[in-house]
Amino acid sequence: MAVGREPRARVDPSKDPQAARIIAAARRLIAEGRAGFTTLELLAEAGVATNTFYRRFSGIDELLLAVVTEIIADNCRRFAADHADHDPVERLGIYIRGAVTGVARRADAVPEFVALELGRLDQAFPDGVEAAQQPVVDLLRESIIEAQQSGAMSSADPDRDAWFIMRLISSTYHHYAFRKGDPNLAEVGESLWRFCQRALGVDL
């Protein structure tokens, strides 16, 4: 059983414009490399009052969990839309390789932020972090099931396999988020994909 405190109630920014405004302000500060912002700095950036913030979040950590959740969900939605027409095996490979090589394509401080905060927040909000990463698992599982149905892949348990691949991607992402200039990033992505193909029974 997961231990640790959990958000008192998960904020839904799609239904709460003020929460969306606060999260957007936090994302701007993070992208600028100011992830260590104070509550006062955040309030000034968002243009909201203190009580507006605390009615939605118990503190900065709860806000950061909402930010990480939104970043991951946005990335998954964008990937699903961009690659919906691809063959499922090809789509899975693009996602797994891109999780590594995409680090180098970002000029802002978001990869470092996500890598640092996922590990730290997992101790405070384990269920919240698991929920934040669920869109990645869902995305992987969908491609695995489609590939399996076409006979291109063999998976005894798509849910389990998707979860393990997500954890592998997360660990690799964490390592390379602080090594954006590594010249071997593309090869690392290819190696990670080959490893996953073997695990999933894809003929190489």
Image (cartoon, rainbow, N blue to C red):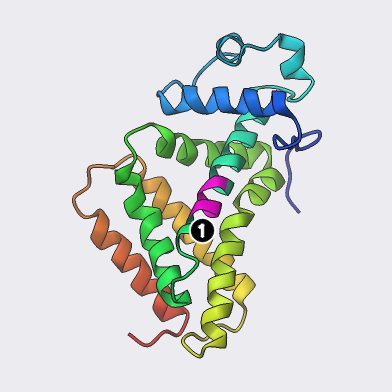
Which residue lies at the image location 56% right of the left edge and 22% below the top edge? 25
Which residue lies at the image location 63% right of the left edge and 55% below the top edge? 134
Q: How many marks?
A: 1
User: Residue 148, position in %: x, y?
Assistant: 54, 84
Image vertical order of residue 109 relative to residue 165, above or below: above
Image vertical order of residue 177 relative to residue 61, above or below: below
* Main SS of residues in magenta: helix
User: Residue 63, position in %: x, y?
Assistant: 65, 28
Q: Nearer the viewer, residue 132 or 12?
A: 12
Identify the residue at the far bottom of this view. Answer: 151
* Residue 174 lies in the magenta stretch: no
User: Residue 187, position in %: x, y?
Assistant: 24, 62
- Res. 34 in view: yes
Q: Does 163 sit left or right of 50 as displayed?
A: left
Q: Residues within 10 Å of mark 1 (few under 14, many from 20)?
A: few
Q: Quadrant of the N terminus?
A: bottom right
Q: Nearer the viewer, residue 193 or 148?
A: 148
Image vertical order of residue 201 relative to residue 196, above or below: below
- Res. 35 in view: no
Identify the residue at the far left of this view. Answer: 183
Which residue lies at the image location 48% right of the left edge and 56% below the top edge? 79
* Residue 75 lies in the magenta stretch: yes
Q: Which residues are magenta?
A: 74-78
User: Residue 82, position in %: x, y?
Assistant: 45, 58
- What residue type is disc 1 on? Ala
Q: Quadrant of the C terminus?
A: bottom left
Q: Residue 194 is drawn in which quadrant?
A: bottom left
Q: Does 30 sit left or right of 158 as displayed?
A: left
Which residue lies at the image location 72% right of the left edge and 18% below the top edge? 53
| Residue named by callout 1 | 81
Q: Nearer the viewer, residue 5 or 152?
A: 152
